[in-house]
Amino acid sequence: MDDPLIVVALLLVAASATVAVAVRDPVRQALVLSVLGVTLAVLFTVLQAPDVALSQLAVGAALTPLLLLLSVRKVGRREQRAGQGDQKGNEKGNRKGKGKAR
């Protein structure tokens, strides 16, 4: 009786996991990872494991994607700062070294 429902839940999990692996943009990966967490929670609910489903909702659908998004944001800010520092250094170096071979 529950077998078709389990099969549908497994197919949803497989599809969302495949999309999570295929997506290259980290922000989109975090969103797809959240969808994967929700589909896993649905699967656990169908398999009559509500305690595992609640844990999966909390960790897999909310906390992990949030930490991933915060990490991507932090790395992006560091790269912007590093890029600005390199540009300033190149501008100073270009003014000093015009016409001279290094």
Image (spheres, rainbow, N blue to C red):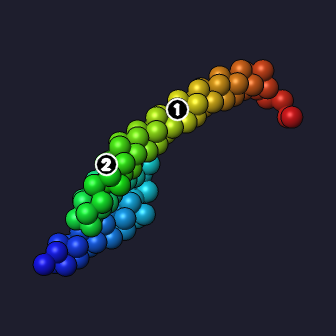
Query: Where residue 102 sits in the image (x, y, percent)?
Result: 86, 34
Q: Is residue 60 above or below residue 66?
A: below
Q: Would you name the residue on which mark 1 appears?
A: 74
Frontmost of labels 1 and 2 is 2
Graded by Cα atoms within 10 Å as few (under 14), some (14 to 19) or many (20 or more), the crowding at tag 2 reads some
Would residue 4 appear left or right of 92 to someone viewing this image? left
Q: Which amino acid is tagged 1?
A: Lys
Q: Is residue 88 above or below residue 1?
A: above
Query: Where residue 28 sits in the image (x, y, percent)?
Result: 36, 49
Q: Which amino acid is tagged 2?
A: Leu
Residue drawn at point x = 22 percent, y = 65 percent = 46
Query: Where residue 4 sits in the image (x, y, percent)?
Result: 16, 78
Which comes sooner in the sequence, label 1 or label 2?
2
Would residue 75 appear left or right of 31 to someone viewing this image? right
As helix, strand or loop, the secondary structure at mark 1 comes to helix
Alpha carbon distance from label 1 to label 2? 29 Å
Farthest left residue in view: 1
Residue drawn at point x = 27 percent, y = 67 percent = 47
Tag of residue 54: 2
Camera-side residue: 48 or 78?
A: 48
Is residue 92 in view?
Answer: yes
Q: Is residue 11 above or below residue 57?
A: below
